[in-house]
């Protein structure tokens, strides 16, 4: 416990293998080092992250609660609320980037808000915002769609809807994909978007091989297929 009143800390993590001190403020590390209860997507990667920030982190003294797409329906949110109400501060860790953004952790935050428990979001990397910043697209009016439909027909319909929103309202459209499907969605964008629509692809953000390129669809069609297969990427239409 960090103080007399418990806190739910929302803890960002690096977007890949990079130096912690280049990504996270030192203040974050001081807070994390004091915590012993964590809600995480995957226990294994959470333990690796804690060891990376502090090789002597007392992991065996910690309690981990796994919250992901497989455990969400059975997750006992009340157990976390009980810990917080008993005075134990808790860290909510994302698998990569910011907690609660394209991440199931929001159910814990919502429950804590209901009980008026203090919530402290910590500063860290967001692939979505970094991609938007680097795209040159409108940052005043944008929409994040998360993952697009897997079904090919539904995906084509969704792409056309997003492009329609872009044309009518000037709203930058942001979305992501499972890395192994990046090439598939890239080809679908080329097939379903107008020639003058701009597509920005931001891959491996904050990593050594970071790659951010913006072109019109007509220009992408003349280019070689980008090296984004099985690599985390953010897609933006603008």
Image: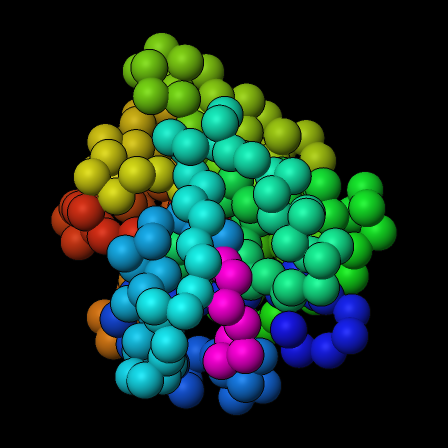
Question: How far across and down, in percent of the image, does residue 71 sit?
Answer: 42, 32
Q: Name the foreground residue: 29 vs 130.
A: 29
Question: How far across and down, in percent of the image, does residue 72 sit?
Answer: 48, 32
Residue found at the very far top of the displayed protein? 153
Residue at 73% across, 78% down? 3
Residue at 40% across, 58% down? 96
Residue 110 falls in image quadrant:
top right
Q: Which residues are magenta?
A: 32-38
Q: Is residue 59 left or right of residue 223?
A: right
Quadrant the N terminus occupies: bottom right
Residue at 59% across, 61% down? 90
Residue at 71% across, 35% down? 169
Residue 37 inside the magenta-drawn segment: yes
Q: Name the foreground residue: 231 vs 1.
A: 1
Q: Is residue 198 left or right of residue 77?
A: left
Residue found at the very far right of the displayed protein? 116
Q: Is residue 57 visible?
A: yes
């Amino acid at each position: 416990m960090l103080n007399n009143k418990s806190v739910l800390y929302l803890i960002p993590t690096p977007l890949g293998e990079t130096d912690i001190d280049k990504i996270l403020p030192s203040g974050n590390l001081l807070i994390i080092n004091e915590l012993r209860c964590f809600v995480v997507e995957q226990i294994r990667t959470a333990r690796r992250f804690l060891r990376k920030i502090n090789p002597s982190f007392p992991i065996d003294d910690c309690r981990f609660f796994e919250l992901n797409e497989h455990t969400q329906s059975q997750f006992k949110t009340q157990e976390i609320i009980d810990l917080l109400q008993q005075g134990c501060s808790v860290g909510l860790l994302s698998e990569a980037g910011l907690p609660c953004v394209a991440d199931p952790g929001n159910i814990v935050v919502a429950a804590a808000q209901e009980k008026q428990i203090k919530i402290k979001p910590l500063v860290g990397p967001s692939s979505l915002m970094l991609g938007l910043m680097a795209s040159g697209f409108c940052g005043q009016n944008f929409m994040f769609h998360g993952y697009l439909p897997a079904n090919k027909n539904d995906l084509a319909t969704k792409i056309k809807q997003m492009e329609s929103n872009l044309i009518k309202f000037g709203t930058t459209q942001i979305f992501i994909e499972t890395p192994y499907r990046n090439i598939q969605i890239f080809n679908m964008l080329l097939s379903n978007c107008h020639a003058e629509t701009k597509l920005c692809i931001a891959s491996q953000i904050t990593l050594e091989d970071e790659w951010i390129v913006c072109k019109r669809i007509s220009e992408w069609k003349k280019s070689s297929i980008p090296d984004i297969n099985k690599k985390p990427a953010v897609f933006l239409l603008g």
